[in-house]
Amino acid sequence: MPWSAWDQGKVWHAATMSLWVLEYRYADPDARARVRPDHLAYMSDLHERGVVVMAGPIGDGSGAMVVLRVDSADDVQAIIADDPYTASGVGADHVVRPWSVAIGGS
């Protein structure tokens, strides 16, 4: 099923998903440097609570990927909204996808 259909809430298994992938690009490198300690504290707290499974910048440094364990896309949107990177304009072009783990992940 194309992602455009998922965006419209038509993917049948999205409600039963518990893992989500969040990808975003860095829009403001200067703001990223200033806000990074707050962002890392926020993400570390979520990790300690079991919400963030893993996270970090992608290889070329243009953005980041986060694997989240939450119940819904709305939960992911709330995490994005509360992230210091969002308030500071660092994160842009957020892409949220449900993820079905086929191998590993136990």
Image (spheres, rainbow, N blue to C red):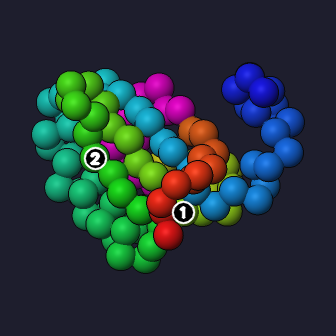
In the rendered image, residue 37, in percent from the top left (x then y), is placed at: 17, 55
- Which residues are the magenta region? 82-95
Q: Residues within 10 Å of mark 1 (few under 14, many from 20)?
A: many
89 is higher (above) or lower (below) than 71? above
Q: Which residue is mark 1?
A: 69
In the rendered image, residue 81, in percent from the top left (x then y), is placed at: 50, 48
Asked if residue 97 lies left or right of residue 2, the reply is left
In the rendered image, residue 45, in percent from the top left (x then y), is placed at: 34, 71
Q: Which residue is mark 2?
A: 56
**Is residue 86 located in the magenta-colored stretch of the structure?**
yes
Label ID, residue 7: none
Q: Secondary structure at mark 2?
A: strand
Q: Residue placed at 53% from the left, 32% from the top? A: 95
Residue 81 shows in the view: no
Q: Tag 2 or tag 1, which sits nearer the N-term?
A: 2
Q: Residue furthest bottom?
A: 49
